[in-house]
Each structure stands twice: as C-alpha cells, then as structure tokens.
Image (tube, rainbow, N blue to C red):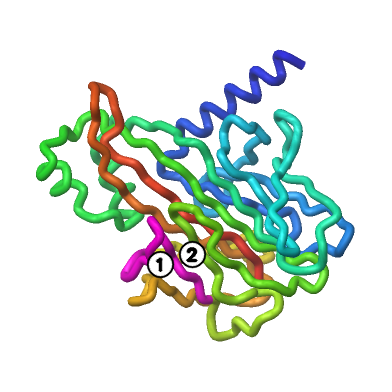
Amino acid sequence: MANWLALATLALFLVAGKAGAHEFWIDAEEYAVAPGETLAANLRVGQAFSGGPISYLPRNFVRFDVLAGGDIRPVEGRFGDIPALSMGDLPDGLAVIVHQTTENRLTWSEWERFLAFAEHKDLGDVTAMHETRGLSQENVREVYIRYAKSMVAVGDGVGADSRVGLRAELVALANPYTDDVSGGMPLQLWYDGASQAGYQVELFARDAADEVTITYHRTDASGVVMVPVQPGVTYMADAVFLEPLEPEADGDAIWATHWANMTFAVP
C-alpha cells in the first residue's frame, strides 16, 4: 500500500508539473442524477477536453465543496480516491461543485512555448511586458492556481448558480437543465471582484461520439458571454488571467496565472 501511495503521489506531481498550459476541470460521471443517487466526479487535467483523473489529495486543494439546497458541503474522501468526489444524499435541485487548487509552480525553459501559451490564452503582449519590466526570456517562472466549478442536476435540477468567492470565476446566468438555452448559454466572467469586459473565453464542446470542438468567444461590456450550446453535448468554458509578480529572490516566480473553469451539460 505504501508503495502504491508513493507511486500515485509521484504520478500526480509529474502531471501537475506538466499542466502549466493545460486545462483543469471537474468532470461529473453523470451530469444528471436521481435523488438519492451518488454524485461522482473526477478532477482532470489535460488538453482538448481530454485528460487523466487526479486523486483526492487534500494538500493539493484549498477548497472542495458541493453547494446544494442552500448548504455548502465539504467534499470528504480518502487519500488517493478516484473519482475524487463521491457524495450521496443530495437534495433535489442544482448542485454546484467548487474546487480551488493550491498554488503550483512551473518553469518555462523555452520562451517560444511561453509565448505560444500567452497567445493561445490571449494574455496580451508578453514580449513587451517583459521588456517593460526588464525581465529575461530565459527560464520564465510562473505560479498557477485553478478555480473550477461544475453544474449537475439532481432530480428536477431547479436552482441557480451564483458567485462563490473565487478570485477567478465563471458564473452561469442560466440553468442549462431547466432553462431554455436554445439561444445560447450566458456566462459571466469575474476576476478580483469585478466582471471582466472584452475577455477571451475558450469553449470546449464534447458530443455523444466524444468528438470535441473548440471555439473562442469574448465577453461584452458587462463581462457576459453568450456561448452557443446544443442538446446532448457536454461543455467546458475556460479563461485565464495573468498577474505580474515582483520576485524577491533569484528563482522566484515573475508571473501568476489564475484559471477560471466551468463544466456543464445540456440535456
């Protein structure tokens, strides 16, 4: 058992170390469950809405809750559990899973890869930012934190998402399980307590055949983006914020990224 736990911990460390340019999301095994059934969900990291599961390891998160029926229920588990979330006895209504990771570190040894990442996530002209701050393009050190949410219908699925206090957060302004979202699913993007206008939101859509389509959208003046959705498809929305850090010693990070993520399905 000790050897297995050591290998699991090492595997997670290796995955996390490679995850700087990868999405992190909550992947419910079923996005609609009957009252009394167990709500199970994996934590995943990967690309193109495909990635391996991450074990339940309390040292790797600062928050892991399920909001249901007006209550906040901390997710409890055993070290190494996969799926990381398994919770029963949830009331009828909309359940919102919330997860915030601890701070992780990454070194970009190749400037071109960091530049490509910044362009992909629409983080601005990082070359000019480095020049303005007098920063080297060698061994760019970053810390990153993930803020993930997922909406699951329990029974009738009635309810609404709301802000839950994450530094970077996507908030659903409609309920995909009960509302008419044929005209699109409205999401609002928040960072540091303010809605974010003109910001890129990347949308991943996985259909019943496991084919994934990726599209890019931008928030309006109120930080709202209307993403196109279709029945029978599972969605992940993702947005990244770049924060400059002032290093106090050699080897300190010079950037922090804050990742807002939301998953849901449209029945």
Q: Nearer the viewer, residue 212 or 16?
A: 16
Q: Amino acid at mark 1?
A: Tyr
Q: Position of residue 146 (x, y in %)?
A: 49, 46
Please report the residue visible at 80 percent of the width from the left and 73 percent of the height from the top. 156
Q: Which residues are magenta?
A: 186-200
Q: Nearer the viewer, residue 16 or 222?
A: 222
Which mark, residue 162?
none
Q: Residues within 10 Å of mark 2 (few under 14, many from 20)?
A: many
Q: Amino acid at mark 2?
A: Leu
Q: Is residue 38 above or below residue 56?
A: below
- Callouts 2 and 1 close, C-beta under 8 Å: yes
Q: Which quadrant would residue 235 be assigned to in this image?
A: bottom right
Q: For the stretch drawn in magenta, what is the main secondary structure?
A: strand
Q: Is residue 130 left or right of residue 222?
A: left
Count the numbered circles shown: 2
Q: Which residue is mark 1?
A: 216
> Is 169 contained in the magenta span?
no
